[in-house]
Amino acid sequence: MAGALQLLVLLVLLAAAWRPLGDWMARVYTDERDWRVERLVYRVARVDPRSEQRASTYAVAVLAFSFAGIVLLYLLQRLQTLLPWSFDRGAVEPGVAFNTAISFVTNTDWQSYVPETTMGHAVQLAGLTVQNVVSAAVGMAVAVALVRGFVRSRTDRLGNAWVDIVRGCTRVLLPIATVAAVALVATGVVMSLRAGVDLTGPDGTVSTAAIAPAASQEAIKELGTNGGGILNANAAHPYENPTPLSNILEIFLMLVIPVALTRTFGRLVGSGGRRSGAELDPSGMRQGVSLLAVMAGLWGAVLAVIWTAEATGAAFAGANLEGKEVRFGIPGSALFANTTTGTSTGAVNSLHDSYSAVGGGGTLLNILFSEMTPGGVGTGLYGILVVAIIAVFLAGLMVGRTPEYLGKRLGRREVTCAVVVTLTMPALVLLGTGLAIALPSTGDAMTNAGPHGLSEVLYAFASAANNNGSAFGGLTVTSGFFQTALGIAMLLGRFLPIVAVLALAGLLARQPRVAASSGTLSTGTPLFSVLVAGTVVLVAAITFLPALALGPIAEGLA
Amino acid sequence: MTVVQEPETEAAAPSAVTGAQLRRQLGAAVRVLLVLTVLCGVVYPAVVWGVSRLPGLHADAEGSVLPGGGSSLIGIDPVPADPAADPWFHTRPSASAPDDAVAGLGPADATTSGGSNLGPRAEDLATAVQERRAVIAARDGVDPATIPPDALTASASGLDPHISPAYAAQQVPRVARVTGLPEDRVRALVAGATEGRALGFLGEPRVNVPELNAALVGAG
């Protein structure tokens, strides 16, 4: 009952934020004026904010920005000993530094290291926190560029990547994160520049607890759907997530931008991409709501599975509390686990590896839905728009007409781009998992044997290729093979789809708008939502059912 | 001042990326990244840190340290001088307890954090639960079947400061006997360290072990 109320309050909070935040973000990406701090950024960086870029230039800008981010983050880790607040933690090993640099720039935040003993505060703040913000801003920028592709016609310009990235930071991510970080400190999240705090137990023993500047990173790690903990236990650590109140706030932060972006999308489509104040076509908002319905439906369905499985699937001790914290209990853990895997965040407040076969399978399924329920910041929106294109195309095949979506024809080239986005992830996950299982060393890397061990490996590659970052943590991933293979999976899983999405946006923007005819599939309807949701489930089922059958399904039936 | 701008018209194929374009964007990328590093990696955390220095937030930001020297957020299991006369309330098992402790029933290593990652069918988990059940039943003098689940399972952080009210209640008679305090007094201390659901519906009812043991020291 209390758990249900918790869910209800979360939904009410999201509903309340949906409209103002969604409308605000629509303004952010159409505003013709710059804020003072932004003008300063453009001046220092020598960027002309009024110039518009082609799809190819936009893609080059995004890739160059991410590449520079990887190099800088790698160097910061390798040169850690020269930085302040490194506490003799030493230079980060090359394999870890490589994997971590890719991981944080790709918004994955997969962690193959123990943060409190590996990374000093300077690397955490100037390296990892920065990528927590800017990688999320990149995701939003790409999503907005795709929406512009639908909204604009007869142009080869998609906007300015630098403006979109900078505004995402200054107008959306940093303001919300600052408020949220202070709220988190008030619940007990630490924000300390010390390395550790000496604690005296009642028995007189003195021990040192790791401490860190956690609040600023905690807020943006959830808000930007990043998920990398500043402490090893992540959001299960009482210093990162001390109370049920901080828990519900962190869950809210993960969901709020991906959910509100559906409103932003509807608003931009409805207003033809013009500045706010322009008259709004209500059918545009229906388009956004129809996608939100898909996200919410699948998020809710998997939540029911995980929650039920954890509440009823006790194996040994009378309740499934191994790897869970008492303050959250089953509802607070299940809600967090479902949200962190559905949003591509990957922060954890409980250990998914210790979940029941069905509950852990639910978290894996969320990731295998290709992160769009509701998905990461920006990535969720462009992910589901691509599936919507596939769904319209499939429907077009059935009736034998050239498919159209939002007034744009979906020809061979557009659908090719959409298919590249859709198939990149399954290819990476299945090839990576297959390769890992074929290696004799992988058996030793597993904590759990049998089907659960396979689930650990499958989860690792699913998490990396989908830029989620959570883990069935029992798998030891510090070997050269896993550092490299998962690094490549993160890299390709992030940037192949981004390039294809921007190419798609360029193709769409160049097209003239076609008027809807009697043969046009009506989108923005409940029927369309069902069609899109069906496509999400179908693609995941076709590609992953055999692997899931050998992992969680076999374990659940054993 | 050089400006990154594309000409409105270009003779080359519209989607071709030239080397000059690549260099321009890479240069802009490095400069934007460095400026945003200052904004997101220095200014933003500095503002949050500055606000966290305010009275009322400062103690939380520095780890919620109790007057007695423990932290209300970090559960490190106390070790009794004489195991036969154990005066402490105990936390949950921890994956970071020393290797020589029985199945995680020992003080956690707070310099790190984490759980066992054992799956529900792992034999190691079954064995650990069995061992914990026997040790805790003997320590508290209770029927092994009545031990609450949070006492038998390791937390996700390894530092869970909380136990269920049922596990606290199970430990009351032993603590009262060893410390010589009346059971009612111990029960009152437990009630003082018990938190209900936040706002009546968030989270689970729980007993804060570091606070409870600190109160016990004060009472004894």
Image (spheres, rainbow, N blue to C red):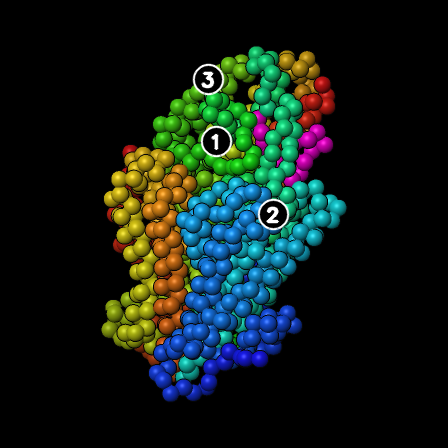
Q: Amino acid at mark 1?
A: Ala
- Mark number displayed over residue A85: 2
Q: Quadrant of the C terminus of chain A?
A: top left
Q: Are marks 2 and 1 in contact (CB under 8 Å)?
A: no
Question: Front-most of A188 and A251?
Answer: A188
Question: Front-most of B125 and B150?
Answer: B125
Q: Residue furthest front?
A: A82
Q: Which residues are magenta?
A: B63-77
Q: Is residue A499 above or below residue A13?
A: below
Residue plotted at (72% across, 21% down): B219
Q: Residue furthest right?
A: B55
Report the side of A542 relative to B84 (left or right): left
Bin the neighbour count of mark 3 within 10 Å (Cα to Cα): few under 14, some 14-19, many 20 and up.
some
Provide the chain ID for the residue under circle 3.
B
Q: Secondary structure at mark 2?
A: loop
Q: Nearer the viewer, mark 3 or mark 1?
A: 1
Q: Amino acid at mark 2?
A: Trp
Provide the chain ID for the residue under circle 1.
B
Q: CA distance from mark 3 to mark 1?
A: 18 Å
Q: CA distance from mark 3 to mark 2?
A: 45 Å
Task: Residue B159 in the image: state x and y as whole percent.
Answer: 55, 34
Residue plotted at (39% across, 43% down): A478
Q: Are marks 3 and 1 in contact (CB under 8 Å)?
A: no
Residue holding disc 1: B95
- Mark number displayed over residue A520: none
Report the side of A549 relative to A465 (left or right): left
Residue holding disc 3: B134
Q: Is residue A524 above or below residue A476?
A: below
Residue plotted at (49% across, 71% down): B27
